[in-house]
Amino acid sequence: MARKKQRSTSKSSPLPYRDGVPPSYLILPCDEQHPKGRWPNLLSYLQYRFPHIEPDMLKERLTRGDLVANDGQPLNEEALFIAGAKIWYYRDVPNEQRVPFEETIIFQDDFIVIADKPHWLSTIPSGRHLKETLLIRLRNRLNLPDLVPAHRLDRETAGLVLLCKQPEHRGAYQTLFQQRNVQKTYRAVAPINPELTLPRVHRSLMVKGDYFFTMKEAEGEANSETAIDLLLTADCSEEGGAAWGLYEMKPHTGRQHQLRLHLASMGIPIENDPWYPEVQPEPEHDDYSAPLQLLAYTLAFTDPVTGEERFFKSRRALSIPHPEEGHAGL
């Protein structure tokens, strides 16, 4: 039996959601915006715009009617290039590998879902991850095509994510995070640095790094702040090597990779971090045996819709679990 198509409440797209995934779109550039000038047809532009896709594949997609105009009419191989036109299509990720870990729903009501995300699962579609993301999994699992996250976690990070069910309340929950009205606690496993005095507050100016989407610290007025404490220590090696610690972090700001950079800058990089303090070569396949030891542990806030006080705790644990963890959801 064919699966019933999900539709978004948005009226801007001529295509419905498909398996929880919204359609993507491309706006064709105006002549003066593009050095190559006018394109003879749509196919020639697509071959230039997407050089990593085989030309025959692009022809095949046009022949199948996979690309449609803004009015929903399918475009074919003879379609003209029309500057400024919006082209709609479904993004395709061939041979997408399943992430062999499951998300857990900690809480949900009429307005929000609190999900406990595993390591290795992206929050939203990106790069080579489309259906194997928290958002698309939950849209399909809960039959909620308008579900969106109010914030994001790195793919490598596990823990709590708040998602909004209804578009009319989306802004209220996203504003909570933008205005720093959510109290967040993270935990991480990292080496012990005997020269550090903890607890402490680490402040720094974070700027774009030298590689891809990494960050680095620079001289200047701080734009990031994290309170850091050491909860306990443990010897994680069979030979009795250097001690590791379970750290607790409370970020006051929410910069990209803030916790990962701050701990690395203090000489205690998070265990299994592929980006900090140095970028490691990207492996051909994910090593599921070595997850980043970073967990978004708690969320606390006043619900902007119901007015209730909310507190949620992740049920996941790191390689050094805290002996007093209750693993409660509410």
Image (cartoon, rainbow, N blue to C red):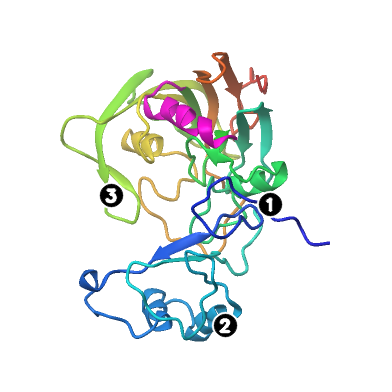
Mark 1 touches mark 2? (CB < 8 Å): no
Which mark is first along the chain, 2 or 3?
Answer: 2
Q: Looking at the image, which residue is at 56% across and 34% down?
A: 164
Element carrying mark 1: loop
Q: Looking at the image, which residue is at 37% across and 40% down?
A: 256
- 22 shown above or below 229: below
Q: How far apart are marks 3 and 1 (CA)?
A: 31 Å
Q: Distance between the residues labelled 3 and 2?
A: 43 Å
- In percent of width and height, residue 195 lies at 32, 26
Quadrant location of the C terminus in the rendered image: top right
Q: Nearer the viewer, mark 3 or mark 2?
A: 2
Which mark is first along the chain, 1 or 3?
Answer: 1
- Residue type, mark 1 in image: Pro
In the image, 70 versus 240, the foreground residue is 70
Q: What stretch is highlighted in magenta?
A: 165-182
| Residue of label 2 | 63
In the image, 191 versus 137, the foreground residue is 137
| Residue of label 3 | 209
Q: Alpha-carbon neighbours of circle 1 within 10 Å: few (<14), some, or many (≥20)?
A: few
Q: Distance between the residues labelled 1 and 2?
A: 35 Å
- In percent of width and height, residue 295 lies at 54, 33
- Residue type, mark 3 in image: Gly
Q: Is residue 116 left or right of residue 266?
A: right
Residue 53 on the magenta span: no
| Residue of label 1 | 100
Q: Quadrant of residue 194?
A: top left
- 295 shown above or below 95: above
